[in-house]
Image: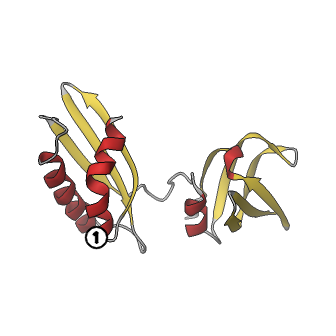
Amino acid sequence: MLDDRIKEIISEDIEKEGFEIFEIKSSQFKGRTIIRIFIDKPGGVTTDDCGKVSDIAGFLLDNSDLNIARYDLEVSSPGLDRPLASEKDFKKNIGMVAVINLKETVEGKIFYEGKIISTGNDIVEVSVKDKNIKIPISKIHKAKLRIEI
């Protein structure tokens, strides 16, 4: 898959600069390849960070064997309402409130909203109305942070 190949080409250099590649999405539009790279780092991502990663990724892609003649490159943060998909995502957000939709029930429910307490062994523990619920990450369909304004 193109996204995986792009990640192989750019990840080492991007990570050396202190960034995490959160996600890569590519698509076709009017004969051009659109490459979207979502990055993160401790403390958040600035527009200067996006420019720096864009320069690095563009250089690496231009000098790779991908053979993408015409492409547009977009680099951004995954945003505040980013999905939580892995144990690492939950661990970085301990203390935050998550909205979790499940593939199958856990303790009789398919939806939880609660504070992330801990994570480990592919389990996320959330506090819901003074009760801690342990949810296997494999049972999560979608999860994201609840944004409070």
Q: Position of residue 100 (x, y in %)?
A: 68, 50
| Residue 113 sits in quarter | bottom right
Residue 23 in sight from this viewpoint: yes
**Quarter the N terminus occupies:** top left
With 134 as the anchor, is 79 left or right in this view? Answer: left
Q: Amino acid at mark 1?
A: Glu
| Residue 71 sits in quarter | top left
Residue 129 in sight from this viewpoint: no
| Residue 108 sits in quarter | top right
With 127 as the anchor, is 64 left or right in this view? Answer: left
Q: Residue at x 48, y 59 (%)?
A: 80
Q: Residue at x 60, y 59 (%)?
A: 87
Q: Residue at x 85, y 68 (%)?
A: 130
Q: Nearer the viewer, residue 69 or 94?
A: 69
Q: Position of residue 41 (x, y in %)?
A: 39, 69
Q: Nearer the viewer, residue 119 or 77?
A: 119
- Residue placed furthest toward the bottom: 43
Q: Position of residue 29 (x, y in %)?
A: 25, 28
Mark 1: which secondary structure?
loop
Circle 1 sits on which residue? Answer: 17
Q: Is residue 80 above or below residue 101?
A: below
Q: Position of residue 47 (x, y in %)?
A: 26, 64
